């Protein structure tokens, strides 16, 4: 820190000599300081506002001003400033409370040698936290910009398909760039193929002077012109500046500074193999363009160039060579080109995609019964439905008279296609269409080929998708995959999903209750409710198979609400039978916690009960909290205020920091079974479990060990002062009535 300015330190201390000792210790460690000492609330508030400290040191007990009060004020008025207690009276209990309230550290006055390292560490953590916030903000801004560019791309591509007049297309391109892309201005420049001179074709505002000056400079001597535009036109590659007011390649720097232009990009486009012009985009922010954004803009410019080339070379006739005039969709030839592009993109990104061939059944009967015009209207309607299913018009083509193709990119697994086709079935594969005032059932079959498994080139993918379509028409299946093994796997997965939906609708899911047991007395301390599903005659389905499906389908919200109600009902049922009041824990999924209605769902499950009488506990995992930590914490605090206890499940397998752990509104920490499995055999696991138990107790939390299966494990955990255990050593998960019998059998003698 020797090269930085002095560290501004605010000291809340009523004993001047103690403050001086702290300052002396910091300076002795080589730290340069600017400090201010206060001992009243008013002075503390004023110093926060005027002195703007980088670190706050505070005594814990002062006659006029309490240290915890100072901490609360600091967290309110300067939440990002590190706060360190320097006290002679701070015990372990108060230290933990201070850390939970937001203190960075504490140092005893009898051990001031720790103070310099504590200050440096607090400053480093504050800087890292600030950097993380800046990084997160930058990432959010980048994602927003990329989303705007993608939205811009969709709008431009729609205009390319819709507009057939060259000038109209160029005007629309620049207008959309400003309206949808968020750019300050857009210009489109053209190069005369005969003279090589550049001219301004389109501008989106009235200030043409700056772009005209750059164009004139280029036209005087294209080989020696030194502008950003000249660089892009000569190289044929995009050029950009993220600091337009300071970049020497930007000739109109002063004008741009006055106009608030922060970044500038020039993207050349090619027609017939030559640079035909450039798109010039201005952005207000500095640092606007990055490689991903330039790639997307380059793709967009290439699409524009492709459309211009079609218009220039072939006009309407050649354009129709790539599009179906009836539906406006790409034809087989253009589909081949798009497949080649999709294959290149998928290979470079290591991704998969699917090609779906769709055939309208008995289409000739519709033509014969209602006429060709009616048949054309059916084809147009099916084309629109296909676009809705695929998401974009560019992903759909008309392969033949009554045959379409859908390109589905960014595929994770074959099951994604199956689910999409299942959802699309009522709209596209089996639907009612009005033909001349009469409702006509229109059905279709589909065949699916997946890249790269079912074909490494465009021709093979089309051929194999059509082969799968032919098999679907032969077998009567709604759709089939080219690879039979995928058919079986997807069919099995979708069948399981359908059965699970029916099971939820029919109330076939059940809860099983596994006891948590005090390690010292072996008495039951509570129960955890676990989901079980007996799939009719097919036997029990493993939770590892159906719980992820509940998450994927969103059914976990409904099932989670049901599970909480059932847990509360089990608790009340045991009480009604005169049994001990065993609280029941229910696992909470990420989808439930993200739901705005989560707190109300818990309140509804409690049905008016609060406090200890509610009988409900919730179990969460570390990773579940990390998506939106502040919102998650607030919802958990609201739930805890209802009397619901909260346990942190599977501790040690997530990634929350100890700083977050001290903030969590939890009562219990559950050590994951992965650490318990070898705790008696592996010294490292024993050390880790010991540390976890000590940490939990320091935070005044109960500790439950999961997956205890042997008496040796139980005895060691008892010696390590673990509070409770859960696992097969004591009992498996039991039906509610059997669990009641277990509770009764372990009741203390009267």
Image (tube, helix red, strand yellow):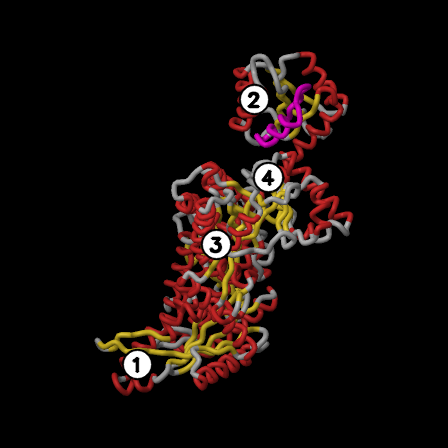
Pick whichever of labels 1 and 3 is earlier in the sequence: 3
* Residue 47 place in picture, x, y as percent: 56, 19
Question: Disc 3 and disc 4: Cα gap in Å?
Answer: 31 Å
Residue drawn 45% across the image and 58% down it: 555
* Residue 225 place in picture, x, y as percent: 58, 54
Q: Nearer the viewer, mark 2 or mark 3?
A: 2
Q: Residue furthest front?
A: 750
Question: Disc 2 and disc 3: Cα gap in Å?
Answer: 44 Å
- Label 4: which residue? 660
- Label 1: which residue? 375
Question: Disc 1 and disc 3: Cα gap in Å?
Answer: 39 Å
Residue drawn 39% across the image and 72% down it: 425
- Label 2: which residue? 70
Point out the stretch of residues depicted in magenta: 84-102
* Residue 738 place in picture, x, y as percent: 52, 55
Closest to the observer, 684 or 65: 684
């Amino acid at each position: 820190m020797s090269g930085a300015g002095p560290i501004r330190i605010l000291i809340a201390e009523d004993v001047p000599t103690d403050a001086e000792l702290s300052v002396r210790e910091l300076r002795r460690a080589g730290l340069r300081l600017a400090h201010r000492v206060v001992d009243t609330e008013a002075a503390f508030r004023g110093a926060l506002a005027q002195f703007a400290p980088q670190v706050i040191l505070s005594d814990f007990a002062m006659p006029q001003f309490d240290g915890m009060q100072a901490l609360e004020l600091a967290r309110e008025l300067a939440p990002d400033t590190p706060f360190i207690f320097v006290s002679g009276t701070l015990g372990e209990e108060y230290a933990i409370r201070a850390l939970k309230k937001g203190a960075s550290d504490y140092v005893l006055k009898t051990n001031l040698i720790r103070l310099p390292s504590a200050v440096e560490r607090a400053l480093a953590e504050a800087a890292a936290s600030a950097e993380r916030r800046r990084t997160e903000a930058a990432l959010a801004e980048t994602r927003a910009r990329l989303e705007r560019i993608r939205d811009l791309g969709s709008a431009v591509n729609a205009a390319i398909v819709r507009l057939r007049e060259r000038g109209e297309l160029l005007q629309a391109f620049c207008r959309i760039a400003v309206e949808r892309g968020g750019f300050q201005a857009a210009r489109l420049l053209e190069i005369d193929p005969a003279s090589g001179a550049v001219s301004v074709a389109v501008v989106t505002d009235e200030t043409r002077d700056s772009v005209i000056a750059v164009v004139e400079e280029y036209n005087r001597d294209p080989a020696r012109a030194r502008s950003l535009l000249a660089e892009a036109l000569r190289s044929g590659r995009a050029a950009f500046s993220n600091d337009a007011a300071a970049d020497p390649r930007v000739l109109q720097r002063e004008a741009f500074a006055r106009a608030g232009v922060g970044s500038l990009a020039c993207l050349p486009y090619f027609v017939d193999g030559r640079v035909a012009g450039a798109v010039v985009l201005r952005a207000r922010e500095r640092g606007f363009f990055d490689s991903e954004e330039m790639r997307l803009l380059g793709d967009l410019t290439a699409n524009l160039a492709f459309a211009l080339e079609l218009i220039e070379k072939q006009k309407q006739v050649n354009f129709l060579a790539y599009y179906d005039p009836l539906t406006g969709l790409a034809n087989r030839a253009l589909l081949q080109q798009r497949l080649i592009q999709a294959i290149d993109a998928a290979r470079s990104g290591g991704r998969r995609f699917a090609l779906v061939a769709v055939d309208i059944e008995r289409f000739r009967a519709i033509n014969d019964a209602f006429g060709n015009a009616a048949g054309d209207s059916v084809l147009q309607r099916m084309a629109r439905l296909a676009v809705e299913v695929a998401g974009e018009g560019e992903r759909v083509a008309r392969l033949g008279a009554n045959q379409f193709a859908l390109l589905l990119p960014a595929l994770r697994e074959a099951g994604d296609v199956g689910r999409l086709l299942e959802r699309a079935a009522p709209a596209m594969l089996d639907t009612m269409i009005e033909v001349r005032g009469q409702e006509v059932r229109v059905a279709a079959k589909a065949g699916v080929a997946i890249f790269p498994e079912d074909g490494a080139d465009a021709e093979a993918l089309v051929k194999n998708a059509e082969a799968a379509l032919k098999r679907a028409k032969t077998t009567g299946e709604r759709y089939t995959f080219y690879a039979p093994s995928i058919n079986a796997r997807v069919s099995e997965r979708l069948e399981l999903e359908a059965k699970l939906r029916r099971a939820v609708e029919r109330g076939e899911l059940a809860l099983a209750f596994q006891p948590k047991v005090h390690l010292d007395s072996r008495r039951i301390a509570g129960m955890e409710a676990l989901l079980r599903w007996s799939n009719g005659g097919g036997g029990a389905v493993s939770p590892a198979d159906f719980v992820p499906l509940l998450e994927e389908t969103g059914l976990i919200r409904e099932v989670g609400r049901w599970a909480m109600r059932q847990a509360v009902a089990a608790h009340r049922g045991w009480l009604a039978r005169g049994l001990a009041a065993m609280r029941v824990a229910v696992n909470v999924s990420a989808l439930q916690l993200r739901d705005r209605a989560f707190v109300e769902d818990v309140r509804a499950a409690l049905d008016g009960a609060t406090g200890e009488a509610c009988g409900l506990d919730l179990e969460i995992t570390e990773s579940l909290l990390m998506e939106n930590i502040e919102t998650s914490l607030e919802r958990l605090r609201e739930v805890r205020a209802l009397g619901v206890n909260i346990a942190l499940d599977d501790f040690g397998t997530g990634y929350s920091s100890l700083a977050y752990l001290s903030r969590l509104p939890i009562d219990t920490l559950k050590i994951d079974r992965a650490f318990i499995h070898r705790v008696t055999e592996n010294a490292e696991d024993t050390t880790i479990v010991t540390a976890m138990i000590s940490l939990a107790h320091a935070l005044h939390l109960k500790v439950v060990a999961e997956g205890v299966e042997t008496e040796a494990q139980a005895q060691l955990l008892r010696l390590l002062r673990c509070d409770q255990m859960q696992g097969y050593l004591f009992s498996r998960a039991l039906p509610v009535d059997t669990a009641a019998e277990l509770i009764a059998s372990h009741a203390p003698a009267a």
